[in-house]
Image: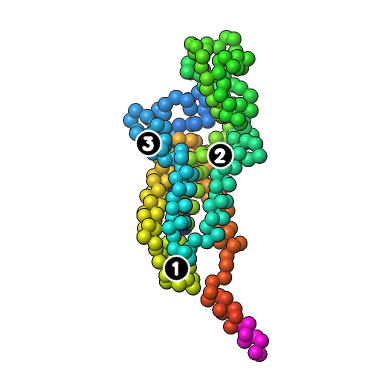
Amino acid sequence: MPDSRALALAAVTSVVLFGTIYSVGYDTYLDTSNPLITAQPHHLHETDYFASKKNPLNVYFTKKLWGWTTGIFLFHFFTSPSATRTRTRLTQYFIATTIWLAFTSWFFGPPVFDRLTASTGGECVLHLPTGATVHVPEQYCYTKSTISTTTHTSLFPASLLLPDGEWAGVPRLRRGHDVSGHIFLLTLSTLFLVDQLRLSFIPPPGARPSAAQWPPMHKWAVALGGVATCACIFATYTTSVYFHTPSEKLTGYVLGVAAFALTQLPHYLLATPTRNEIASHQVVTSEKVLS
C-alpha cells in the first residue's frame, strides 16, 4: 500500500502545477508584489468568488491556518491511543512551528520571507486611499509599524495629495520576489496533518491491542483532520489559480516541502526500539554468550 505521505505530496504537487499552468494560460493570477495593483481588488473578483481576498476560506481558514493545524494536532494527539502518543510527534510539531515562526514572524529580526523579498529588490511601500504610494525605510515594514499623516509627516512629500483628516496605514514590502506564504503554509500543513493522521491507522509494532485501540473521541479528531486536509488542498488550488506569479508559487511549494522534510528527522533521530526488536536483540546476545 502506498505511503499516505507520498500520496499527499503527489496531490499537492499536482494541484499547484495545474493551478499555476491554468493561471498563466487564462491570465487569472494577481502579481501581489506589484505595488501599483496589489492594493486593488483582483481583476476577476466580480466574476470569480475565490478571486476575492475577502472570501471566507481565505479570511477564516487560510490566514489562520497554523492555528487550525495546531488545534487539530493537539486534539488528535491527546485522543490518540496511548501507544501513538510519542515524543517524536511532539518534536515534529515543535519543528514545524519553529519553521513557521521563522519564515513568517521572526528570525533574529525580520522573518525569512521579509529578508528574501528585501534581498531581491523589495521596497517598503505605504498605500494611500487615493491610490498613491509612498516609499518608506524598510525598518517600518520589518516592525509592521503604523504610519500616520500626523505622526510621520516627514515621510510624506509636500507635493503628495493626502487623505482628508488624520489617516494611518501599515506599509508592506513590494516588488522583489514575494514568496507565496499561503502556498508554503498550505503545503506544510497538508503534509504535516496527513503524516499525523496516518498514525491512527498504523498500530505501532509490538504494541498491546488495548494500547492501540481508539479512544471514543479519536474518531472525531480523525474526521476533523481529514476535513481540514481537504480544505487545505482546495485552498492550495484557489491560491495557485488567483494569486502570485508562477515563480513565487514554486518557491512557496519547494520551501513547504523542505520544511515538512525537516519534520521527518525525529522519525529517525528519536526512533525507539520496539519490544520485538528488544526481544530479538536479547536472543541474539544470549546466543553469542552461549557460543
Amino acid type for the residue under numbered disc 2: Thr
Q: Earlier in the sequence, mark 3 or mark 1?
A: 3
Magenta stretch? 284-291
* Residue 3 spot, x, y in % from top left: 45, 62
Instruction: Look at the numbered discs 2 and 1 and tell me whether their residues touch, using CB distance below 8 Å.
Output: no
List the residue tagged with mark 3. 56
Question: Which mark is on residue 104?
Answer: 2
| Number of numbered discs overlaid on the protein picture | 3
Q: Nearer the viewer, residue 156 or 30?
A: 156
Quarter occupied by the C terminus: bottom right
List the residue tagged with mark 1. 211
- How many C-alpha atoms fall within 10 Å of the one at disc 2: few (<14), some, or many (≥20)? some
Amino acid type for the residue under numbered disc 1: Ala
How far is disc 2 from disc 3 in space, using C-alphas? 22 Å
* Residue 111 spot, x, y in % from top left: 60, 38
Q: Is residue 283 visible?
A: yes
Amino acid type for the residue under numbered disc 3: Pro
